[in-house]
Structure formats: C-alpha cells, structure tokens
C-alpha cells in the first residue's frame, strides 16, 4: 500500500470489485477511504453476483444502488 497510495492521491478512481476484495478483513474501498484517498461521489462500483458487501444470495439479480456505508453509487 505504501508504494501505491502516493500514485492514487488526487486521482479519480473507479473500482471493479466484489465482496471478496478485502485486506486484513476490510474491503479495499474502506481501506482507501481510511488512508485519505478521496473517492469521488461520481465513482461507480461495478459489482457482480452477491452484491458489493456480499450480502445477496447466489444468483440474485444485482441492480444499481448506493453503498450505505460510504454513500457511493454502484451498479
């Protein structure tokens, strides 16, 4: 993280992630936010089956929504 965080500062980020992208039990989005990386409210998170936080059943249809923890829109 120390190597990549400086390259991310001041950039507009887009993440293609699912609920398994965790580091030390914390989702990458939450890790970036906690490290002071600004994630724009315009950012869309592209989430496959199971939803962004992994709270949907297998095969569930995932529609666009908003992550309640961060307020960031995803689809």
Image (cartoon, helix red, strand yellow):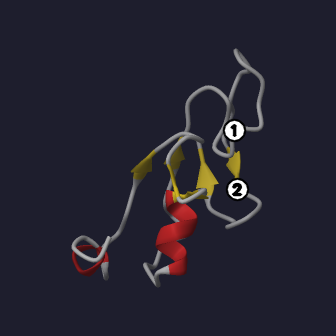
For label 2, the residue is 67
Q: Residues within 10 Å of mark 1 (few under 14, many from 20)?
A: some
Picture residue at 50% right of the left edge, 46% below the top: 21
For label 1, the residue is 54
From the viewer's perspective, is 54 left or right of 28? right
Is residue 64 or residue 54 the one in the foreground?
Answer: 54
Picture residue at 49% right of the left edge, 59% below the top: 28
Tally of numbered tags: 2
Residue 52 drawn at (x, y percent): 63, 43
Picture residue at 66% right of the left edge, 40% below the top: 64
- Which image quadrant: the N terminus? bottom left
From the viewer's perspective, is 5 left or right of 51? left
The image quadrant that residue 50 belongs to is: top right
Residue 25 drawn at (x, y percent): 60, 56
Instruction: Report the mark closest to the observer, 2 or 1.
Output: 1
- Which image quadrant: the C terminus? top right
Q: Residues within 10 Å of mark 2 (few under 14, many from 20)?
A: some
Position of 28 relative to 20 (above/below)? below
Separation (CA) of disc 2 from disc 1: 12 Å
From the viewer's perspective, is 12 left or right of 31? left
Q: Secondary structure at mark 1?
A: loop
- Which is more N-terminal, label 1 or label 2? 1
């Amino acid at each position: 993280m120390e190597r990549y965080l400086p390259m991310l500062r001041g950039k507009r980020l887009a993440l293609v992630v699912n609920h398994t992208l965790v580091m030390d039990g914390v989702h990458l989005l939450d890790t970036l936010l906690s490290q002071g990386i600004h994630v724009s409210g315009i950012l869309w998170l592209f989430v496959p089956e199971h939803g962004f936080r992994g709270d949907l059943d297998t095969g569930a249809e995932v529609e666009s929504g908003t992550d309640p923890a961060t307020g960031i829109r995803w689809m």
